[in-house]
Image (cartoon, rainbow, N blue to C red):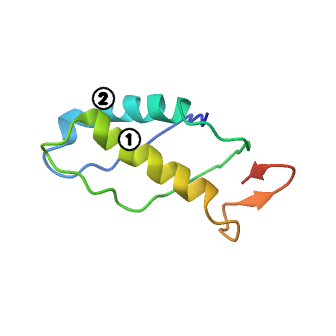
Amino acid sequence: MIEVSRLRLHMPPGFEARAEKIALLVGDHLQNINISDSAHIEKLSVDGVTASLGESDYVIAGKIARSIVDRTTSNPSNSLYSREGGLNA
């Protein structure tokens, strides 16, 4: 599980009214992801996630959640990542 205390999404035109629901769904997705390490990340930016207006909020949130997980777990040399008995940043 990944816990996020604050999430700020920058949504393109057409998605503004959907941002709050998408943010909540990102949290739901992150709670359901099984990772063995623990982490504390003060600030994290992820690359843009491609989404179309026709995609559901659930699908878009899943893409954002996957991007967060990939960013936090894939690159040990990342300045946000340091190992100390687990994943800590």
Q: What element carries label 1?
A: helix
Of the numbered discs 2 and 1, the one sitting upstream in the chain is: 2
**Mark 2 or mark 1: which is in front?**
1
> What residue does disc 2 label?
21
Quarter of the picture holding the C terminus: bottom right
- Which structural element holds mark 2? helix
Can you tell which quarter of the image residue 48 is in?
Answer: bottom left
Query: In the rendering, which numbered label is found on residue 62?
Result: 1
Image quadrant for the N terminus? top right
Relative image position of residue 11 (x, y in whole percent): 26, 48
Residue at screen point 80% across, 49% down: 86
Distance from label 2 to label 1 (Cα)? 12 Å
Most extreme residue toward the right is 85
Position of residue 70 relative to residue 57, above or below, is below
Residue at coordinates 29% horizontally, 39% vertically from top-left?
A: 59
The reply to whether the C-beta atoms of the residues labelled 2 and 1 are less than 8 Å apart is no
Give x and y (percent) for residue 63. Answer: 37, 47
Q: Residue at x 50, y 50 (%)?
A: 68
